[in-house]
Image (cartoon, rainbow, N blue to C red):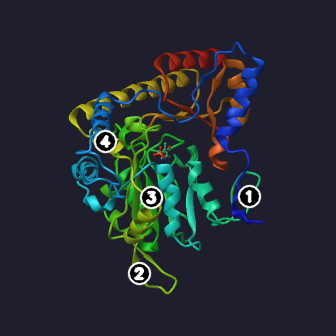
C-alpha cells in the first residue's frame, strides 16, 4: 500500500472556514426563513473593474487568431507585466526592484505555501498569533512541526502573540529564528506596521541571518501616508525579505487568479555544508519546474490594473470597501465595542463583548442577529476573545449588519 505523508495527520481537522460553514448550514436548515448576512470569509464581492475586463477580452481575441496566438509563456510571467509591476509598485515608492526579481503566479496563497520547498526542514519558523492559517498549515504539511496542543499551537513553531496588550505589534523572538512570516496590513487583525516596526524586523533578520516572508496582499488598502506599502521601503530589506503580492483583494482577482512574489537576487541561504546560495536561483528553478505560467489573458488583465483607468477604478473599489469598514467601525464603537483595524485594511477586529469566547460570540451573533463573522480563536490561540468582520460586502448588507448588532447590544 502506498504510504501517505504522515504530517498531514497532524493538521487540525476542523479547519476554520469549514467549521463556520457547518454551523451556518445547520442553523439555516433549522431556520429557513432567517436572512443570514455573511461577514466572514475574506472574499471580494464587487465585479472586476471594466478596464481589466476590456484588456482580458482583447487578449482572448488575440488567442483566437493564428497571427497573435500565444502558447506557453515565460514561467516567471510576461515582461510587460513584470515591468508594469516594478514601475507601479516599487520604483514609484523608491524601491529598487528589478523585473527579473518578480515572479508572476496564480496566487499568494500558493506562493506562501510553495516557498517552503526551497528551505530546509531544520529552520526555526516564527509566526504571529493570530495568523493567516495557510502559513501554519503549510509548515505542518512540510514536516516542520510536531503535534498541536489543545489551543491549536504546534510544537516547534515560535508563536509571536499580537493582542491589544502589545498594541498588535509582535515582539522580536527571544530565541534565534530562521524564517519569519509577517503580513501587513494584517489579516485577520486589520492592523498595520510602521516603518520603524518593519525596520526592527529587518535589523533582526540581518543580525540573525533570518529571512522574512512579507505578505502584502492588502497593501492597496493603506490610506495613512506614513505606512510602508512594501517591505523594500525599509533600509536593508532586499538582503533579507521575500515579498508576496496579489491582485486578489485590490483588483478583485480572487476568482481570476494572479499574484506575484519578489525574490531579490541579493538574498542568500546556506546549504548543509555551509556554503552560500542564491535564493533567487532556487526559486527560479522551483517555479520553472513546477509551474507553467499564468494564462496570457489574465496577465493582460493584471497589466490593465496599472493603466490610468484601471488605477482609478481600483481606487474606487478600495474606497467602497473602506467605507464599509468605517461603517462597521463606527457602528460597533457606538454600542461600546472595542474595535481595532479597519482603517488601512478591509478587516475590523473586535473584542468580544462580555468576555465571551470567540465561538460563543459567533453562535450568539448567528442565532440572535443572523450574522456570520469569523471567530478570532480560529486564527490562533491569541485570537481567543476576538472576532473578525470583513468589509467585503454590499453596502446594504453592511448597513443592515450594523443595525442588527446595535439592536443586539443596546
Ligand atoms: C487573500 C489573501 C491572500 C491572497 O491570496 P491569493 O491566493 O492571491 O488569492 C494572501 N495573503 C493573505 C493574508 C490573504 O488574506
Quadrant where the image shows the N terminus: bottom right
> Could you classify mark 2 by the number of other residues whose Cα lies within 10 Å: few (under 14), some (14-19), or many (20 or more)?
few
Q: Nearer the viewer, residue 236 or 5?
A: 5
- Residue assigned mark 4: 63
- Residue assigned mark 2: 276
Q: Is residue 388 positioned above or below 209 on the image?
A: above
Q: Residue at x 46, y 79 (%)?
A: 270
Q: Residue at x 64, y 39 (%)?
A: 17
Question: In screen coordinates, is 295 left or right of 32?
Answer: left
Provide residue 245's location: percent of width, then percent of height. 40, 49
Tag 4 and tag 1, C-beta contact below 8 Å: no
- Residue assigned mark 3: 291
Q: Nearer the viewer, residue 191 or 131?
A: 131
Quarter holding residue 222 = top left
- Residue assigned mark 1: 9
Q: Residue at x 25, y 60 (%)?
A: 96
Upstream in sequence: badge 4 or badge 3: 4
Q: Is residue 176 positioned above or below 194 on the image?
A: below
Tag 2 and tag 1, C-beta contact below 8 Å: no
Provide residue 145's location: percent of width, then percent of height. 66, 65
- Give the Cα distance between marks 2 and 1: 34 Å
- Give the Cα distance between marks 2 and 4: 43 Å
- Give the Cα distance between marks 1 and 3: 27 Å
Q: Nearer the viewer, residue 161 or 81?
A: 81
Question: In screen coordinates, is 10 left or right of 141?
Answer: right
Of badges 2 and 1, the one in the foreground is 1
Of badges 1 and 3, the one in the foreground is 3
Upstream in sequence: badge 1 or badge 3: 1
> Could you classify mark 1 by the number of other residues whose Cα lies within 10 Å: few (under 14), some (14-19), or many (20 or more)?
few
Tag 1 and tag 3, C-beta contact below 8 Å: no
> Could you classify mark 3 by the number of other residues whose Cα lies within 10 Å: few (under 14), some (14-19), or many (20 or more)?
few
Amino acid at each position: 500500500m502506498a504510504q501517505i505523508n504522515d504530517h498531514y495527520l497532524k493538521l487540525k481537522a476542523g479547519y476554520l472556514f469549514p467549521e463556520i460553514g457547518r454551523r451556518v448550514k445547520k442553523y439555516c436548515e433549522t431556520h429557513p426563513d432567517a436572512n443570514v448576512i455573511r461577514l466572514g470569509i475574506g472574499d471580494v464581492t464587487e465585479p472586476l473593474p471594466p478596464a481589466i475586463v476590456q484588456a482580458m477580452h482583447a487578449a482572448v481575441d488575440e488567442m483566437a487568431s493564428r497571427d497573435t496566438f500565444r502558447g506557453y509563456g515565460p514561467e516567471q510571467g510576461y515582461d510587460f507585466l513584470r515591468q508594469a509591476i516594478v514601475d507601479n509598485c516599487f520604483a514609484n515608492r523608491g524601491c529598487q526592484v528589478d523585473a527579473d526579481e518578480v515572479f508572476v503566479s496564480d496566487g499568494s496563497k500558493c506562493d506562501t505555501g510553495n516557498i517552503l520547498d526551497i528551505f530546509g526542514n531544520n529552520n526555526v519558523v516564527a509566526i504571529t498569533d493570530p495568523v493567516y492559517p495557510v502559513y501554519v498549515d503549510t509548515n505542518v504539511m512540510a514536516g516542520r512541526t510536531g503535534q498541536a496542543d489543545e489551543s491549536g499551537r504546534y510544537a516547534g513553531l515560535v508563536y509571536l502573540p499580537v493582542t491589544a496588550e502589545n498594541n498588535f505589534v509582535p515582539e522580536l523572538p527571544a530565541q534565534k529564528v530562521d524564517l519569519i512570516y509577517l503580513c501587513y496590513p494584517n489579516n485577520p487583525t486589520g492592523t498595520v506596521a510602521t516603518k520603524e516596526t518593519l525596520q526592527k524586523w529587518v535589523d533582526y533578520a540581518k543580525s540573525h541571518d533570518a529571512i522574512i516572508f512579507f505578505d502584502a496582499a492588502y497593501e492597496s488598502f493603506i490610506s495613512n501616508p506614513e505606512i510602508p506599502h512594501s517591505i523594500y521601503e525599509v533600509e536593508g530589506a532586499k538582503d533579507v525579505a521575500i515579498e508576496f503580492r496579489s491582485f486578489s483583494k485590490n483588483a478583485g482577482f480572487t476568482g481570476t487568479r494572479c499574484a506575484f512574489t519578489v525574490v531579490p537576487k541579493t538574498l542568500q541561504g546556506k546549504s548543509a555544508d555551509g556554503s552560500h546560495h542564491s535564493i533567487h536561483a532556487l526559486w527560479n528553478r522551483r517555479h520553472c519546474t513546477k509551474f507553467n505560467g499564468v494564462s496570457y489573458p489574465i496577465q493582460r488583465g493584471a497589466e490593465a490594473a496599472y493603466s490610468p483607468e484601471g488605477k482609478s477604478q481600483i481606487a474606487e473599489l478600495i474606497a467602497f470597501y473602506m467605507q464599509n469598514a468605517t461603517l462597521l467601525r463606527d457602528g460597533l464603537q457606538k454600542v461600546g465595542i472595542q474595535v481595532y483595524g479597519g482603517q488601512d485594511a478591509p478587516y475590523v477586529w473586535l473584542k468580544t463583548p462580555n468576555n465571551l469566547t470567540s465561538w460563543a460570540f459567533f453562535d450568539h451573533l448567528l442565532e440572535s442577529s443572523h450574522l456570520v463573522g469569523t471567530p478570532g480563536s480560529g486564527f490562533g490561540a491569541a485570537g481567543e476573545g476576538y472576532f473578525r468582520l470583513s468589509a467585503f460586502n454590499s453596502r446594504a448588507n453592511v448597513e443592515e449588519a450594523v443595525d442588527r448588532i446595535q439592536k443586539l447590544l443596546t
